[in-house]
Amino acid sequence: MRKMIYSLWALLVVCFSLGMMSCTSDEERMQILKVYNWGDYIDEDLLVEFEEWYKEQTGEEVEIIYQTFDINEVMLAKIENGHADFDVVCPSEYIIERMMRNNMLLPIITPEFEAEINARDINYFHCVSPYIREQFSLLEAPEGQNPNDYSVGYMWGTTGILYNKRYVTDEEASSWDLMFDKRLKDKIFVKDAFRDVYSPMLIYAKTLEARAQGELGEDEYIDIDTIHDLMYDSSDESIALVESYLKRMKELVAGWEADFGKEMMTQEKAWINLMWSGDAVWAIDEATSVDVELGYAVPKEGSVVWFDGWVIPKYARNVRAARYFIDYMCMPENAIRNMEATGYVSVVATEEVYAELENLSCGEMEACDLSYLFVDDEGRSIEGSDSVFVDPVLYPDRSVIDRCGVMHDSGDRTDKMLEMWSRVKGDNLSTGMLVGIILFFSLMLIWGVWRKVDTYRRKQRHIKRRHQHIKNNK
């Protein structure tokens, strides 16, 4: 009997200890904020500053664990299959759409949370441009759910062609024809992102098809409504059409890149690269230091305008801190710092950001109509925003936006598109592609060591140019 009592007592002690450990573990976990973002996509000083700001606002301490990814689908697989408990993630628009369809997201903006931050006078969600919110509202979501409650924009831009002006003219870069120019064999790199390649190629293929059928003249292009419709088109016919064009292109392509295309361009190992505008800004800026002149163009046939946004996955453990973090990223001063650090364009479009446009632009300046983006609290375009001298790579003119569609999730058809993408990339490996892959891994080893140093150097150079620009204008 005594042994039984001792055994029961020991069991109770063990259970109590395990319970205390579990509570302690949960309590400690609630002080962690796990952020999953694209590489080189934030001013990392803001992460530390957020921890301090969060304590000021709530009285609670939080520690950020920050991890990065390079491909949307890799990020999604971790959450979808591994139930990874990231609190804040930054996917692209079509992935946000997929996550909403699959009930993978928690609401960011709720009446209770809005009341809490309004009471503290720290609600910055309204700083996101109405144009961006309108684009997010087009994302397909379950009935009764507003995409703008489940996602908040972060950065945006276009997909186009980065080109070396020594070998390619501005006129040549104004058409997707350039991607099929045989004189550029083994000098072409393409972003390894199947949706960002599929959609522009479908627009291009349908344009040529319409011209061949006499529906369009040689200098005419399909209208924006048709482009919007094509953003949903993942039919067998369209997939086969794009595949035929990509296989022709592949004969000239040196490599499919996730991140190393910028270096290939600045080192003149590639002359053109199908890539995102933010990467293009970085490459153009870096190329000037080695006397290489690069340009960027969105072809006249049409392309895509992309958006990345913050979401809270349903497996998140620290939802409150996640909401505060997203609100913090929408502060105009933080948006400006993130643009300076990354070269990408924030969705925040307040008068403070508008006032910084000239300082943020480091490329060739053009008068651009940005009245679609910069709108005041009363819904009116900010005065003068219809003709702003800015870097058009960073801030595309309305005429560019008017020929770009927003990508959408293909649902059950996604596997078909991925199979096509694998066939295109896997049929053969050219010598140039093999060299590119080997060079990529070599560069990544070096990049891992020098990344922090390089980021600091670029930031300092940017600040110096800013100060010089301000000094010259005084």
Image (spheres, rainbow, N blue to C red):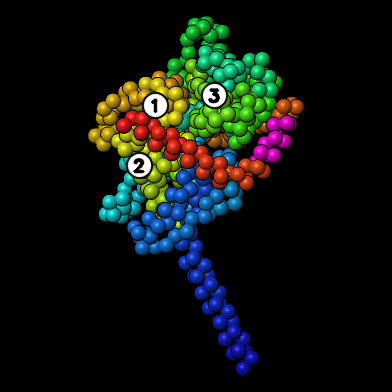
Residue type at mark 3: give it: Leu
Out of 218 and 435, give the one closest to the viewer.
Answer: 435
Q: Check disc 3 and report the residue beneath it.
A: 294
Q: Are marks 1 and 2 in contact (CB under 8 Å)?
A: no
On screen, residue 104 above or below 219: below
Q: CA distance from mark 3 to mark 1?
A: 17 Å
Q: CA distance from mark 2 to mark 3?
A: 30 Å
- Element under label 1? strand
Q: Quadrant of the N terminus?
A: bottom right
Q: Check disc 2 and report the residue beneath it.
A: 332
| Crowd tier of the residue under label 2, counting other residues whose Cα lies within 10 Å: few below 14, some 14–19, many 20 or above | many
Q: Is 442 within the magenta?
A: yes
Q: Is 464 within the magenta?
A: no
> In this image, 97 relative to 183: left or right?
left
| Residue at horizontal 69 percent and vertical 39 percent from the top | 442
Out of 35 and 331, give the one closest to the viewer.
Answer: 331
* Residue stretch in magenta: 434-444
